[in-house]
Amino acid sequence: DIVMTQSPDSLAVSLGERATINCKSSRSVLYSSNNKNYLAWYQQRPGQPPKLLIYWASTRESGVPDRFSGSGSGTDFTLTISSLQAEDVAVYYCQQYFTTPPYTFGQGTKLEIK
Amino acid sequence: QLQLQESGPRLVKPSETLSLTCTVSGGSISSSSYYWGWIRQAPGKGLECIGSIFYTGTTYYNPSLRSRVTISVDTSNNQFSLKLTSVTAADTAVYYCARESPITGSLWGQGALVTVSS
């Protein structure tokens, strides 16, 4: 199985400031035939199911604000929120879907307001 | 718009079998583009994949749960189901069903809190 490791475990950022969450996979999730990274990011607000934000490491899901962006390739990935809003308080998860299921998750990063 | 809804008993006794069904609406479970999965989240914890199924019935299980898990699909009713045997308090969690795309990630149901207690 591919192991996903996120850092940090928790993060406090001031409103309007940038938040950065990292995700590392135990092996590459880059599919060479199409040059796509099979890595997604989810947001989970309290009491809610996870919501897909980004797939293919950097493609925003429809309706996701453009302050959310994803980057990286191979084994190292980053989710960036360019200007933190109050509604962005949540736990964020990365997930690989490079292998057949189960598609493994990182342990989550809790984002709070400083 | 695709929707997934979990149903089943919310209270299960220790050593018994947890059974949940996910009903899919707004799309066909027989699509060759997706897997259909179960994920759980213990209180205050992260996400744990339980397993997935393709509409043909091919299953994929988390090795740590494989001996206790069965996932099945009912294409005629657009449903798929989870059975987890010999449950303990450690199996208390919110259980989510999800449509899993090998292209664009997963779409989730609202989740069902299942408590294991006598």
Image (spheres, rainbow, N blue to C red):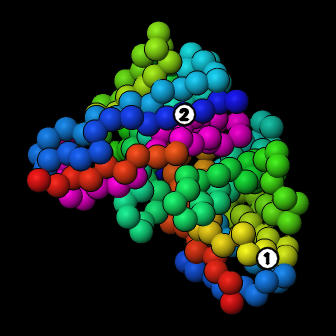
- Quick one: which residue is furthest to the right in this view? A66
Q: Is B91 located above or below residue A101 in the figure?
A: below
**Badge 1: chain ID:** A
Q: Position of residue A47 (x, y in %)?
A: 52, 60
User: Residue sitting at 50 percent across and 66 percent down?
Assistant: A107
Which element is circle 1 on?
Answer: loop
Q: How many marks?
A: 2
User: Hey, what amino acid is under mark 1?
Assistant: Leu
Quarter residue B90 falls in? bottom left
Same subunit, labels 1 and 2: the answer reads no
User: Residue sitting at 51 percent across and 31 percent down?
Assistant: B36
Residue B102 falls left or right of residue A61: left
CA separation, marks 1 and 2?
31 Å
Q: Which residues are magenta?
A: B85-109
Q: Is residue B102 magenta?
A: yes
For the residues bearing labels 1 and 2, Cβ distance under 8 angstroms: no
Q: Nearer the viewer, residue A2 or B117?
A: B117
Q: Which mark is residue B4?
A: 2
Q: Is A31 located above or below residue A40 in the figure?
A: above
The residue at which mark 1 appears reads as A84
